[in-house]
Image: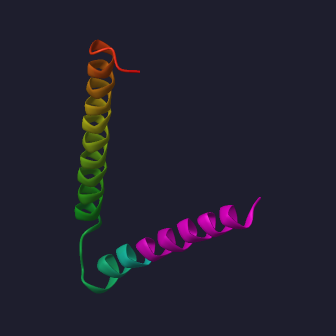
Amino acid sequence: MSRQGRRFFRTILVGTAALAALVWMAVDQFGVAREEMLQLLFVTAATVGLVILVAAGVAGLWIGLRKLWGRP
């Protein structure tokens, strides 16, 4: 694996650990209910999924219009 690849995976690992620590702190120190955290997680995942679907739709429309207009 290249140096750039190792750096990328290390960044992903550190970011994930920081997010896990933030969630743990919210649950443990501030008394946020686990059910509420799960609900927030599901809403966030649904929002990200919706954004991805909309972006895929716009990209598909853009590619379709380019082919319709005859541009390579």
Task: Return the x and y of residue 72 as percentages of the image width and height.
Answer: 41, 21
The stretch in magenta equals 1-20
Q: Where is residue 17 drawn, in percent x and y?
A: 50, 73
Q: Residue at x 72, y 67 (%)?
A: 3
**7 is within the stretch colored magenta:** yes
The residue closer to the viewer here, 54 or 49, is: 54
Asked if residue 24 lies left or right of residue 8, the reply is left
Name, please, the residue furthest toward the front.
Answer: 71
Q: Nearer the viewer, residue 28 or 67?
A: 67
Residue 69 place in picture, x, y as percent: 27, 16
Q: Which coloring applies here? A: rainbow
- Residue drawn 62% across the image and 70% down it: 10
6 relative to 21, above or below: above
Q: Is residue 13 left or right of residue 41?
A: right
In which quadrant of the rendered view does residue 54 lie?
top left
| Residue 16 highlighted magenta (yes or no) | yes
Residue at 24 percent across and 80 percent down: it is: 31
Identify the residue at horizontal 77%, vertical 58% (top origin): 1
The mark total stands at: 0
- The relative height of residue 49 versus residue 20 in the rendered view (above or below) is above
Q: Is residue 6 or residue 41 the one in the foreground?
A: 6
| Residue 11 % position (x, y) | 56, 70
